[in-house]
């Protein structure tokens, strides 16, 4: 696998989550392989030099916020309590556990039994499932592939956490007991294992950057990508180390410079907003910044400058390759898929991680929060962020989506960082473009601008000029 293929593979994993690998297929450089008993597996990127996104806290840089982060952390702790039954071995893959047992554990942890608590817990389980921290299927939950990224140094802290969590008071069930549910999950996993290459993961949710990138605990992060549709698979698994990725780039630097490069890499990749270059030597120094750019390029990424601030985004060439492969119907596992905003594609482009409903809602928000205020002179011409929220009533009035589907699309876009929710005091507030729009390259911004013109005024002279220019290429 050459560097170009590896970069596309990394882009796919960042966009969709863990990549399914067929039997005997190696992970790309910079990734670990989580191998199942049938020799299929998942590929996950590793952090350079073992540094985790908790480094952002050390530098007082805000990560992309997790929606209801407290509930999410506590529910993940409850899953860990139920699935990590043997503390003498590594947490992943653990044992399957009934969802009801997880909910009872969470209920015991917070001391509440009301329906609101249950809804919060189920919402957190859904977010954790969508980001591959847990895998849920048919009433059973298992630790997801991302739990394999917990550093060994954190295992003692996790063990202490599990010991301190209370045991739920769970009466013996008269219909199907917990042990029977777990046994059925194990039997189902054994009977459904494919004998050939691993099949593709079902249609992923949106999120080319992070659905939510923040520390969960023990230096963990909640990243983008869906594991929706994956079956709960019990049994042994092993973590296989991948090929070193940055040693040739970092080997020539002393320990201090190396640490500065790794810190800048983690910050531009996981921060919610562009960071000031004056705070990081690897952003101030042109030579170090060039090395940082080479590190990002190996993961299909590039540095994006906002005056004296920097952040990372998808490389235009990698995004175009991934988009072309997806349009050709080769699927996400062939090379990965980027969200429309990262690939520079429009909300109405060929279906990728964003569904039709999500694209329609995103387009409406961009029209009402960006296009209209810009036409009125209230926004700078090159800004894709806006202080002018689009009220939910406006979205309901201009879309034919059912209320439930609209709310689901808004939730998906919020989790992907494509939309932000604004509270306006006593008023209803609304939605504005999210922090992912910081990560658009200049070329992607131009393409999105053209698509917004076509969406807002398809019969205008400006739209005709856009179409004529495209047809001439």
Image (cartoon, grey):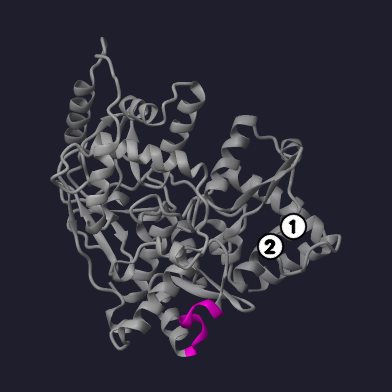
Image check: 214 left or right of 392? left
- Is residue 449 shown left or right of residue 179? right
Query: What predominant SS class does the magenta segment belong to?
Result: helix
Q: Is residue 105 above or below residue 367?
A: above
Residue 183 x/y as whole percent: 18, 26
Residue 417 position within the rendered picture, expressed as x and y whole percent measured from the top left:
56, 53
Which one is in front, 292 or 65? 65
Taking 12 as reference, is 150 left or right?
left
Q: Secondary structure at mark 1?
A: helix
Q: Which mark is residue 453?
A: none
Q: Earlier in the sequence, mark 1 or mark 2?
A: 1
Pick the residue in front: 260 or 202: 260
- Compared to residue 207, the image places residue 450 above or below, namely below
Q: Residue at x 40, y 61 (%)?
A: 53
> Mark 2 and mark 1 in contact (Cβ < 8 Å)?
yes
Please count the marks in the image. Answer: 2
Q: Which disc is residue 384 wearing?
A: 2
**Residue closer to the observer: 392 or 442:** 392
| Circle 1 residue | 370
Magenta stretch: residue 166 in it? Answer: no
Asked which quadrant contains residue 161, the reply is: top left
- Asked whether residue 42 is in view, the answer is no
Q: Is residue 282 magenta?
A: yes
- In the rendered structure, the answer to whether residue 435 lies left or right of residue 17 reads right
- The residue drawn where x is 31% and y is 58% is 44
- Magenta stretch bounds: 278-286
Q: Position of residue 278 (x, y in %)?
A: 55, 80
Secondary structure under the numbered disc 2 in the rendered image: loop
Q: Residues within 10 Å of mark 1 (few under 14, many from 20)?
A: many
């Amino acid at each position: 696998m050459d560097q170009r293929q590896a970069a596309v593979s990394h882009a796919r994993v960042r966009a969709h989550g863990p990549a399914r690998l067929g039997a005997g297929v190696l992970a790309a450089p910079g990734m670990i392989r989580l191998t199942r008993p049938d020799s299929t597996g998942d590929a996950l990127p590793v952090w350079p030099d073992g540094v985790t996104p908790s480094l952002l806290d050390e530098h007082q840089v805000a990560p992309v916020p997790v929606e209801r982060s407290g509930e999410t952390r506590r529910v993940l702790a409850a899953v860990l309590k139920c699935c990590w039954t043997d503390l003498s071995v590594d947490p992943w893959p653990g044992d399957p556990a009934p969802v009801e047992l997880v909910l009872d554990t969470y209920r015991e942890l917070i001391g509440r039994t009301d329906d609101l608590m249950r809804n919060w817990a189920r919402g957190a389980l859904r977010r954790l499932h969508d980001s591959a921290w847990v895998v849920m299927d048919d009433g059973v939950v298992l630790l997801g592939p991302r739990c394999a990224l917990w550093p060994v140094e954190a295992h003692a802290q996790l063990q202490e956490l599990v010991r301190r969590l209370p045991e739920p008071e769970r009466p013996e069930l008269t219909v199907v007991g917990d042990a029977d549910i777990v046994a059925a999950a194990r039997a189902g996993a054994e009977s459904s294992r494919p004998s050939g290459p691993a099949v593709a993961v079902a249609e992923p949710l949106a999120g080319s950057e992070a659905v939510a990138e923040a520390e969960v605990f023990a230096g963990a992060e909640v990243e983008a990508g869906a594991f929706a549709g994956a079956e709960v698979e019990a049994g042994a698994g092993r973590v296989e180390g991948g090929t070193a990725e940055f040693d040739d780039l970092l080997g020539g630097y002393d320990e201090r410079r190396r640490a500065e490069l790794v810190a800048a890499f983690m910050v531009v990749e996981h921060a919610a907003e562009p960071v000031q270059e004056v705070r990081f030597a690897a952003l101030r120094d042109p030579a170090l910044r060039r090395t940082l750019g080479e590190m990002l390029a190996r993961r299909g990424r590039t540095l994006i400058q906002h005056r004296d601030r920097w952040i990372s985004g998808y490389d235009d060439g990698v995004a175009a390759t991934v988009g072309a492969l997806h349009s050709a119907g080769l699927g996400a596992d062939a090379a990965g898929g980027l969200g429309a905003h990262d690939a520079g594609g429009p909300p109405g482009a060929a279906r990728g991680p964003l569904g039709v409903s999500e694209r329609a809602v995103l387009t409406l928000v961009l029209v009402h929060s960006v296009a209209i205020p810009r036409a009125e002179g209230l926004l700078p011409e090159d800004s894709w962020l806006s202080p002018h929220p689009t009220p939910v009533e406006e979205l309901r009035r201009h879309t034919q989506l059912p209320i439930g589907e609209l709310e689901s699309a808004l939730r998906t876009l919020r989790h992907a960082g494509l939309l932000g929710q604004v509270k306006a005091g006593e008023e209803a507030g609304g939605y504005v473009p999210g922090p992912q729009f910081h990560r658009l390259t200049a070329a992607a911004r131009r393409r999105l601008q053209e698509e917004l013109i076509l969406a807002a005024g398809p019969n205008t002279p400006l739209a005709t000029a856009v179409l004529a220019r495209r047809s001439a290429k």
